Image (cartoon, rainbow, N blue to C red):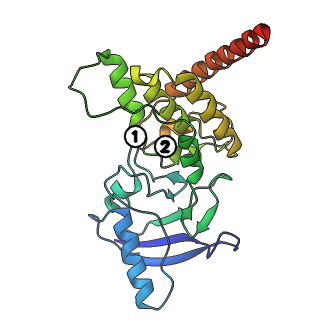
Amino acid sequence: MKLTLKVWRQPGPKATGKFVQYSTTADEHMSFLEMLDVVNEELLAKGDEPIAFDHDCREGICGSCALMINGAPHGPRKATTTCQLHMRTFKDGDTIVIEPWRAAAFPVLRDLVVDRTALDRIIAVGGYISAPTGSAQDGNAIPIPKEDSDLAMDAASCIGCGACVAACPNASAMLFTAAKVSHLGRLPQGQPERDRRVLAMVQQMDEEGFGGCTNYGECQEACPKDISVENIARMNRDWVRATLSDRGEAVASAGTG
């Protein structure tokens, strides 16, 4: 199939970007990234700079392939990452617009590559269990209700691609942060640090410059792993509980002093 691509090209973080038009031919069985590989081979053959874009596993689990395709994070297919998107999704003669994620917290580094380390910093302040856990235990050594384990695993499927941020009119990272808070908060191993975790991660999210959630729901629609906005409600409940608990401890401490 013959395609026209309008690709965002920006040589550096402080450079002015613009759309550049390319014509290419793609096989319907190619993935979207393989199509970009072909375009880059054509550019290199002409002595031009290839298009910079993130990619790693190409199996839909690493979260690297973050592209805005025709205005939608990861393109038109629901619950599909860019690397799992095949060119048969498009038609011969289509024009495809390819952009990087657009969010103040995700500055463009070059072409289609943005800096998503803000998400890493949210994880670093509490998205883990700090206690040494030793070797792997026997299965079912810690009984967990099936509903809780299912919901925890659903939240844990977040690959941190940032599509939720890119889709949100407020560039909010609430769905990402909520998924990371919820998957540990659903499990018994995550209870001792539950309050400290949600307070630290929400504070870091705010400091990174992400916008607030105003219940658009675009994040859930764009998520390639179908993570539910119910996790945001759960995170908000945890945050309120932890805030009141923290305030209560502070009041009690002041009283005894």
Left/right of residue 152 with respect to residue 16 in the rendered view: left
* Nearer-the-camera pick, 206 or 36: 206
Quadrant in the rendering for residue 190: top left
Question: What x and y, as percent, mark residue 220?
Answer: 50, 36
How many discs appear? 2
Mark 2, Cα crowd under 10 Å, few <14 / some 14-19 / many 20+, is: many
Question: How far apart, in angstroms, are the residues tagged by discs 1 and 2?
Answer: 9 Å
Quadrant location of the C terminus? top right
**Numbered label attached to residue 42:** none
Question: What x and y, as percent, mark residue 5?
Answer: 49, 71
- Relative to 126, does residue 36 appear above or below in the rendering? below
Q: Secondary structure at mark 1?
A: loop
Q: Secondary structure at mark 2?
A: helix
- Relative to 253, does residue 131 appear above or below in the rendering? below
Question: What x and y, as percent, mark residue 72?
Answer: 52, 51
Quadrant location of the N terminus? bottom left
Per the image, the residue denoted by label 1 is 225
Residue 187 visible to the viewer? no
* Residue found at x 78% / y 8%: 255
Residue 194 visible to the viewer? yes
Quadrant in the rendering for residue 45: bottom left
* Residue found at x 49% / y 34%: 180
* Residue found at x 48% / y 79%: 50
Left/right of residue 163 with respect to residue 143 in the rendered view: right
Quadrant in the rendering for residue 168: top right
* Nearer-the-camera pick, 144 or 63: 144
Tag 2: residue type? Ala
- Relative to 209, does residue 212 appear above or below in the rendering? above
* Nearer-the-camera pick, 101 or 89: 101
Mark 1 or mark 2, which is nearer to you?
A: 1
Per the image, the residue denoted by label 2 is 222
Tag 1: residue type? Lys
